Amino acid sequence: HAAMLMNAALYGDQNYTNQTTCPDPEAWDWLSTYQPAYILFIAVLGIVLNVFVLLVFCLHKKPCTVAEIYLSNLAVADLVLVSCLPFWAVNIYNDFNWPFGLFLCKVVNLGVKMNAYCSIYSLVLVSIDRYVALVHTMSHGRMRRPKYAKLGCLLVWGFGLLLGAPVLIFRTVEYIPDYDVYACYLKYPNLKVELFWDVMLIMLSFVIPISIISYCTIKIIQALKNQAMERFNAEKTEKKATTLVLAVLLAFLVCWVPFHIVTMLDVLARGLNLEGCSLIDFLELSNQFFSYLAFFNSVLNPILYVLVGKNFRKKVQEVLKQFLVMKTAMSESTRSSTLKTSSQIYEGLTGNINESQLFM
């Protein structure tokens, strides 16, 4: 029953309690055995790498560019996701008995959902920024200001919270007699409400943003091809930033598009009331596999910053130099203070000896 409970927990399947024969329980024994370790691996690695990225952006002496503001916002979204994953690892290891209460049931799953929404809309913003930087350089340069980028990031988080409303409203912790567990899952009042929210979220969190990203990406690639090789340093910097952005976009598409496609197929199957163990097995197995492929994107992004981002590697080197200079300065200050203190103690002792000799 692990697959059905996971599917209900993640996607709000209303009919899982009636599916007693499929999928085959023996085919899903690996779920509670291997997935917790995999989830914890992603969580630990993701937390370390995304905190590292944010520290580099925050500690660097120069202010972040517009593209870096969007990428740091993406790192925050990834950090939120990987920080929520350990709760799910415990939940799976505990045979889907949710031990953390209703509040964390809502908050943890809201964090997971908001990662998907905020990530894709952060990429929408960064795609538009690259589009403006390379395609409309002169006419829209004023739009590319850090204050507008920060405002855009705030709007993304607000919109992500709005799209996460079903999680706050319909997430619940209830006892499931068929499986003898207290499960944290989406419980919609009926199938019509469930399908309405699912279709709306698919449109707002996938179809519309992917269309914008695809259009901007095509225009960006065309602009890069049409540009001559002899350019100013500023435009070379823009190209370096664009290369990193395109790599991040590609990684996002590879990790998240399969998940959204399977989600759409799942909604279509429920809407048309399609049945059959083969179909259920396929959808639930695909949901499992592509969900954790999508989560791996939160680990992959920081790795791409280092491997592809030349400007980011330069920032890392400069931050390390700042740290070494500060450490050297502190070491010299401590050494100077120690020598001064030792000198004062020596002079005090010498003075005491001379005074005692006068009275002997």
Image: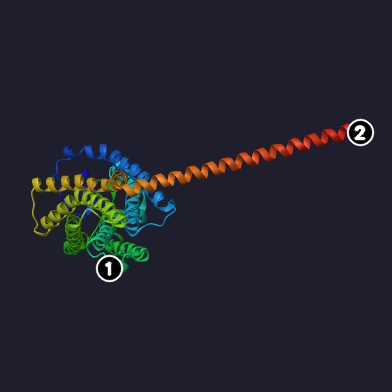
Residue under label 2, please give it: 359
**Which label lies toward us, 1 or 2?**
1
The answer, for residue 220, to whether it is visible in the render is yes
33 is higher (above) or lower (below) than 186: above
Q: Amino acid at mark 2?
A: Phe
The picture places residue 48, in percent across and down from the top left corner, at 37, 44
Q: Quadrant of the C terminus?
A: top right
Alpha-carbon span between mark 1 and mark 2: 88 Å
- The colour style of the image is rainbow
Please tell me how crowded label 2 is: few (under 14), some (14-19), or many (20+) other residues with Cα within 10 Å.
few
- In terms of secondary structure, where does tag 2 sit? loop
Please tell me how crowded label 1 is: few (under 14), some (14-19), or many (20+) other residues with Cα within 10 Å.
few
Q: Report the front residue among 338 and 124.
A: 338
Residue under label 1, please give it: 140
Q: Residue at x 64, y 42 (%)?
A: 337
**Residue most extreme to the top:** 360
Residue 217, quarter of picture: bottom left
The answer, for residue 17, to whether it is visible in the render is no
Left or right of residue 194, residue 41 in this image: right
Q: Quadrant of the N terminus?
A: top left
Q: Report the front residue among 168 and 344.
A: 344
Q: Earlier in the sequence, mark 1 or mark 2?
A: 1
